[in-house]
Amino acid sequence: MSESQTQHPEPPGVGVPERLRPLLHERERICAELESLAGKDDEVSRTRAAGLGADYRRCEPLPPEYAEIMDRRFAAAEAAFAEGLTVAAERREKREQVLETLHSLLTEQARLSASPRLLPHRREFERLRKNWRVAATGVDDLDLLEKAFADSSAAIAARMESEAAAAVSAREALAGLRGELEAARAADRPEEFKEKREGWEAARDAAAAALDPDSPEDKALLGSIRELFKELNDRLVLYYQTLDLARWESYTLKLDLCRELEQLRDTPEEKLPAAAVRLREIRKRWQELGAVPREKQNELGPRYYEYTTALQHRIDDFFKAQRAAHAAAAEKKTALCEAAEALRESTRWNETSEQLKALQAEWKTIGHAGREADGALYARFRAACDVFFNARAQYWAEKQQLQNEVGARKRELCAAAEALSTLPVQEAVRRAKQLRADFQVAGRAGKQEQSLNARFNSAMEAFFNSRHEAVQSAKNRREEILRELESLAAMPPVQAEQRMGELRTEWRSLEPLPREQDARYEARARAAAAELEKALAAVRRRQQRERADWLIPAMRAAAEVVTAARRGEPLPEVTLDLTPFPRLAALVTDVVAAGGRCPDGMDKALSRNAREFGSLLEEWEKTTGSRRGTDAAQDLAADLAAAIAGNFGGSAMAAVRKKETEPAALLRRLLDVGLPEPEQLGDLLSRYASLRATMNGAGSRDDGALQG
């Protein structure tokens, strides 16, 4: 046997009954379709797999030898489909983890790219690229992320190359500066150093800004230059001390102050407050310094007066304008506070939020209102904004909670809709309508609304599609049953009745139909049953008429056997067929089986039968005085028609059932009583014959009275 045959064994093919072939083919079709869904992971496949499972379980039962094979195949197909779903879920989870890692790496790279200098982050950059290669290995469809990471990496690498080149140039410039400083130290010319000091310091500061702060070589280079500057400055001070230590020192310091004043003269507007503080310090320091050398007295005074006067005028103008600006800003901010306070109680959340954000943006553009006023105004403005935004936050929190509750309710309804196929049909249809109404009145679930609607509608559509298929299948089977029912009249009565019962059971088990369609099919079933009843009624009338005619000789034959057994005589041969009278046949069989002796309890049974037979005759005799005969054949036909119609269409039986005290019913009961006591048999059979003659004398319309 091949591997495929082992996994999906075929049901027996040779000798399969014709009636089982459609059932086997239907199950094979379901198994094959479910096997084709293995490895698929989409909503349609999952819905279809669930539908196939329901279809398989609704299939008609098979004999055990076929059912075992088909059940194993269907179980294997279900297991393969479930395993495919598990593998797909694991693959999706792994991909989501990789994507989360890659997005995290992109975020780190963006943060790194925002750094003002990249050279100190070389190792971190290399680590990111290594981690990216490891995380992205074996994952497909990452073109966009790969491109974003590659573009950012290229930009960072380009900036690093540029900064590295600038660092090389700065290192070379500092090396040249160190050479010049070393030459100045070797020449020992303090005046030359003093003249070039500012330029060298500017060159040093500019180059130092471009160096790699983590490079040991660059740190050592800057340290050597600082030491050279310190040594040269020390030599310069010593030089002034040797000339005229006090005056030249004063001159040097005042010269530095003048240079600083010259720089402060061009101070930007926003730095004038700091310049004012520094101006006061310089004036104080100028007064503290002593006199300068005689030849330098006319050099610093005019410069000092010019620089301080010009700077003071700028400072005065600045503070005057600042006070005016503070007053204007305070007025504007007061107006904004009033506007914010007017909006703080508003419940028009979106519109008011935009208005307050506009006020906040305008606040940032107004400027400072003074140290004391600005703090108080900001506290007032912030308090008004906080009242509104706190109320809005509470409103949205309550709304979000409500939406979450609605979302939870709708998820419950979705789960209930997805489980409709597990309920009985009528209950499932009623439940589906109720779920639809509950879903519509549940409210909105915010951002979850669209996905929940899609899930609910998908479940409902799947359920009603399966219902449509089931109803259509039930209609087709009803048509087949009706065609077979119409053909039963050609079969023998016993087989026809047996098949009628089977069809009735199957009819009741079929999927319910809509009310109008069900009424049409029931009407057709009743019509077919009525036609069948006509044929069966004729057979029953003939059989019951013969049975009534055979009752007297049958009882006499049974009585002869009982009498011989009581006397201990040989049993007479019974040549009459007692099959129509089961109780008489059973009595004779028991006597014969007992070796010609009367079984225990037979005497009591005969006495009981005699009482019952006599009681039924009395009831029959009472009816003859008030009613001349009964159309028993018509009664039986009506009962049979009602019974058949009741099997397919309802409770018509109750409308046509005759009373048990009428002659036809009494006759049916008499035929099934059994053998009375032989000593009483003659009188009982005489009364029975008289009553039969009375019944048959009612005319030709009563010729079926003996059927039952």
Image (cartoon, rainbow, N blue to C red):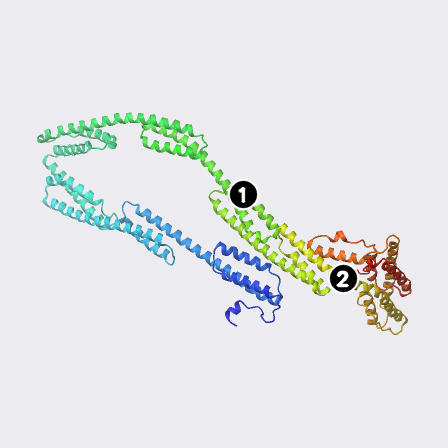
- Residue 705 picture location, percent across and down: 82, 59
Q: Earlier in the sequence, mark 1 or mark 2?
A: 1
- Residue 701 picture location, percent across and down: 82, 58
Mark in the foreground, 1 or 2: 2
In-front residue for pair 267/83: 83
Q: Which mark is residue 123?
A: none
In-front residue for pair 454/334: 454
Q: Amino acid at mark 1?
A: Gln
Residue 230, can we see it?
A: no
1 and 2 marks in contact (CB < 8 Å): no
- Residue 565 picture location, percent across and down: 88, 71
Dot 1: few (<14), some (14–19), or many (≥20) neighbours within 10 Å? few
- The secondary element bearing badge 2 is classed as helix
**Residue at coordinates 56% horizontally, 46% vertically from top-left?**
435
* Residue 454 versus residue 7 in the image, above or below: above
Q: Is residue 441 left or right of residue 599?
A: left
Q: Which residue is mark 2?
A: 538
Q: Which residue is mark 1?
A: 440
Q: Disc 1 to disc 2, how far (Cα)?
A: 61 Å
Dot 2: few (<14), some (14–19), or many (≥20) neighbours within 10 Å? some
In-front residue for pair 356/703: 703
Q: Amino acid at mark 2?
A: Ala
* Residue 200 versus residue 639 in the image, above or below: above
**Residue at coordinates 65% horizontally, 51% vertically from top-left?**
519
* Residue extending farthest left: 295
- The secondary element bearing badge 1 is classed as helix
Q: Quadrant of residue 699?
A: bottom right
